[in-house]
Amino acid sequence: MTLLEVKALSKEFDGLRALDGVSFAARGGEILGIIGPNGAGKTTLFNIISGIYPPSGGEINFEGKSILRLKPHQVSRLGIGRTFQIVRPFQNLDVEANVMVAFGHRVYPSLWKSAGSVWQPEIQKEVQDLIDRVGLRPHLKQIAKTLPLGFKKRLEIARALALQPRLLLLDEPSAGLRFEESLQLMGLIRQVCDQGIGILLIEHNMHVVMDLCKRIVVLDHGSKIAEGSPEEIRSNPLVIQAYLGKEA
């Protein structure tokens, strides 16, 4: 089932075209890789889908309905979650409270109104179950700023999952991680996908991309230059020239 359709999407910043007519579709239960060199437009694409930037042209449909011009909180309420390359937890809150805040966003109309009353037993159980799913139960009461980077990445995913997304945008989840940590995170991403959640994955680690993704979209200078299976992408001359290099 198609979750997200991006059609001829463009974005300009002061005359500089960051995206130029990009089109692709993402499905539920699929991990779709978005790769390309620095400055290719990958994060700009995520920012437009999640409502941070308005597009200069084109269409974005989520479950058959346009999400153009929606604000970030409206996009998230529709079922699109997002993580960032630079993790952004509430540094002085513990793991449980960080995830609880995301549940409060779902349950109450505003964070201000959720203060205090969000700590209901049934919600607290959901929070703890989600923390179990991402492997952070031993760190339930640990302050976020003291977590190692790998655990902060897991916390970021947990907060996004608390919004009950049907599509999850992951921006460089393995950046800065050791090889073993990357393998563990790949396992978590597969588990999320197995639950039927569609995933858009921006990633520079080619081992992660080629292992996780059945389809890959390649951007270069704001344009889509290729789309296909990992095998097709590895052997595509345009991709080799623009991004993969001789190592491909």
Image: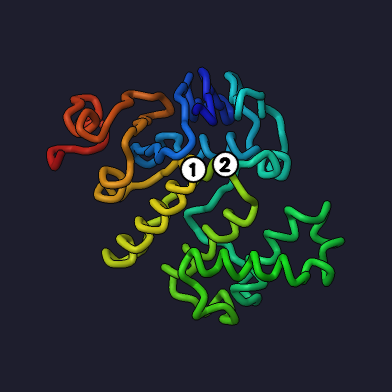
Q: Name the residue type under label 2.
A: Arg
State the residue at coordinates (59%, 47%). 81
Q: Position of residue 212 (x, y in %)?
A: 32, 46
Q: Position of residue 239 (x, y in %)?
A: 25, 30
Taking the view exactly as shown, the residue that stands out farthest to the left is 246
Of the two numbered discs 2 and 1 in the rendering, the one whose residue sits closer to the viewer: 1
Q: Secondary structure at mark 2?
A: loop
Q: Name the residue type under label 1.
A: Gly
Coloring scheme of the render? rainbow
Mark closer to the chain start, 2 or 1: 2
State the residue at coordinates (70%, 60%). 103
Tell me whether the residue at label 2 lies in contact with that at label 1, contact meaning CB atoms closer than 8 angstroms.
yes
- Is the residue 126 above or below the residue 211 in the image? below
Q: Is residue 68 rendered to the left or right of residue 32?
A: right
Where is mark 2, residue-wise?
A: 166
Q: Position of residue 65 (x, y in %)?
A: 66, 24
- Is the residue 232 above or below the residue 194 in the image? above
Q: Quadrant of the C terminus?
A: top left
